Image (spheres, helix red, strand yellow):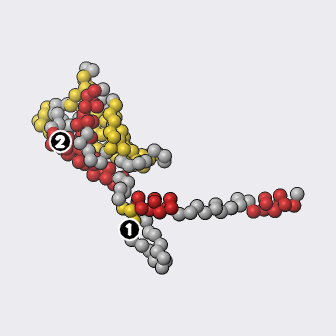
Amino acid sequence: MAFFEDELQKIFSPSSVIQDARFSGRICIGRLGDTTNVKFEFVELGTHRNYEGIKASVFNRNDGLIDSNIFRFIDLLGLKPGRSIQHGNKVSPHVWVNNGKTEWYSYEPNKTDYAIISASINRYLEIFLEPAHLSREVEKTDSGRSGGLTSVKAAIERDKEKPKSKPRRTRANPTKKKDEQNL
């Protein structure tokens, strides 16, 4: 399994999007925000023990899966020089397990290839980043008009400073209360 961990580290260790990346076997798990995480794994796409892409699954720790996408190496890198029966002197990049040994088949990606894979996946992940500085929360001003952008930290502090109001009492079944009074 060290092969897969090493390959995932080559792709995701330099990421500016993923925080606290952890590598284990064929997977990498990291954080995108406080509650949003991402999991990457090498995936087979039709041929047994040929790993032709990486699946990214974005999930919320509380609510579950948000989205997933498969990034095929051929889509990101195209055909590469190598030995291939189907494509002559070109090969579709993939990892394979042959006689118990895991390796890239006929073509091993270089630093530029790893950067291309990483950049493509990071662009996808940026969609799911939680806002760090600004929110589009609309606040009411004293005049009742909508305000502008508010920092998340300021909004949280403002909510903490508000006096706690008594919780409103609601009745799930208004006839139940009347029935209890008649007893």
- Residue that sits furthest to the bottom in the current view: 143
Q: Amino acid at mark 2?
A: Asp
Work out whether residue 127 or residue 88 is closer to the camera in this orientation and state it. 127
Say which element carries label 1.
Answer: loop
Say which element carries label 2.
Answer: helix
Residue occupied by mark 1: 149
Vertical arrangement, residue 75 with respect to residue 168, above or below: above
Viewer-nearest of discs 2 and 1: 1
Image quadrant containing the N terminus: top left
Image quadrant containing the C terminus: bottom right
Work out whether residue 180 or residue 63 is closer to the camera in this orientation and state it. 180
Residue at 32% from the left image edge and 39% from the top image edge: 21
10 Å crowding of disc 2: few (<14), some (14-19), many (20+): some
> In screen coordinates, is 146 left or right of 88?
right
10 Å crowding of disc 1: few (<14), some (14-19), many (20+): few
The answer to which image quadrant residue 135 occupies is bottom left
Vertical arrangement, residue 137 with respect to residue 18, above or below: below
| Residue 30, percent from left and from top | 35, 41
The numbered mark at residue 14 is none
Residue occupied by mark 2: 113
| Residue 116, percent from left and from top | 20, 45
Work out whether residue 138 or residue 76 is closer to the camera in this orientation and state it. 138
The answer to which image quadrant residue 31 occupies is top left
Q: Amino acid at mark 1?
A: Leu
Quote the CA–CA distance across marks 2 and 1: 40 Å
